[in-house]
Image: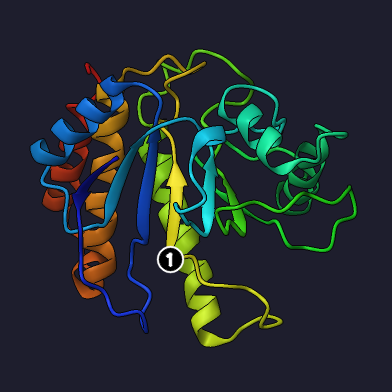
Amino acid sequence: MANITSSSTSEATTPPIPSIHILCMEEKFITAWTTAAQTYNLPSINVTLHHDRLAELPSSVKFDAIVSPANSFGRMDGGFDDALSRAFSPKEDYYTLTRVVQERLYAEWRGFAPPGSCTMVDLETPPKRGALKPNDWGCRYIALCPTMKIPQNVLWDREVVYECIWALLASVGNHNRKVDRGDGNGKDAAIRSMLMTPIATGYGRWSPERWAAQTVLAMKHYAEAAENEEKWHALGPFKAVAHSEELDQTYKL
């Protein structure tokens, strides 16, 4: 486990970007992340890297949400989604999580979540499709961030990781503002920490370097937007081009 950066944020406020745990089964992803964080000047965000598997992640690691790299139809039976199904579905019904996720996707998207989007699934919603089992990490939400329609090579989709991470951060930000305002039924909880993996690097065939670069850039650009509202309201062409050019440089990684 390696702590990359830390920020001192009051418990009474929810930061623009929550604390992040990144689960890396291979050292090459840790190396890629460390390099990208230095290369692109990742701002002060609390990021912890874990060289581990989900099934072996200790209960001392706590997070409010976990990111599913998913597919557009919400089948939770391949790659990291398989690990999620094994962690959250009862042993006697492996597809419980798939049904819960697909019910939410149907309500939000009529069953097809476009790649690059983010859909928040509340694991404590009264089940219609079967009860999920408790987890030891305190995880309340799954953030569905599909990088592909179906399991396939997505090297051709050159910005899908950046789009997914931005959508994830925006979705979490909207969720937390709603909680802070007391909107809804008052039963939602703020997302102050989340766990993710190197998305699009399995079936998607992305390199560790491109994944890390686009994830860092999305976090960096989103933090700039969240902390400088007036500046981003008046974002001019030169600044927009500069952001685009930073992203363009990741295509060959």
Residue at figure coordinates x 20%, y 65% from the top left: 7
Q: Circle 1: is it few (<14), some (14-19), or many (20+) Cα within 10 Å?
A: some
Residue 99 image position (x, y, % from top left): 82, 41
Q: With respect to residue 98, does 60 lie above or below? A: below
Q: Is residue 197 left or right of residue 102?
A: left
Q: Residue at x 28, y 50 (%)?
A: 47
Element assignment for label 1 = loop
Whether residue 144 sits left or right of residue 130 in the image: it is left
Indicate the quadrant where residue 201 lies.
top left
Asked if residue 71 shows in the view, the reply is no
The N terminus sits in image quarter: top left
Residue 71 lies, with reference to residue 64, above or below; the image says above
Q: Is residue 50 above or below residue 150?
A: below
Check the image and report above or below for 136 versus 124: above
Rendered location of residue 17, percent (x, y): 34, 61
Q: Which residue is mark 1?
A: 192
Tally the marks.
Answer: 1
Q: Residue at x 18, y 69 (%)?
A: 231
Viewer can see residue 51 = yes
Q: Position of residue 48 (x, y in %)?
A: 30, 47
Q: Position of residue 64 (x, y in %)?
A: 52, 60
Residue under the image location 82 percent in, 40 percent down: 96
Query: Quick one: quadrant of the C terminus?
Result: top left
Of the pair 246 and 168, the residue shown nearer to us: 168
Relative to the observer, which residue lies in front, 141 or 241? 141
Q: Quadrant of residue 223?
A: bottom left
> Which amino acid type is marked by label 1?
Arg
Q: Nearer the viewer, residue 51 or 105?
A: 51
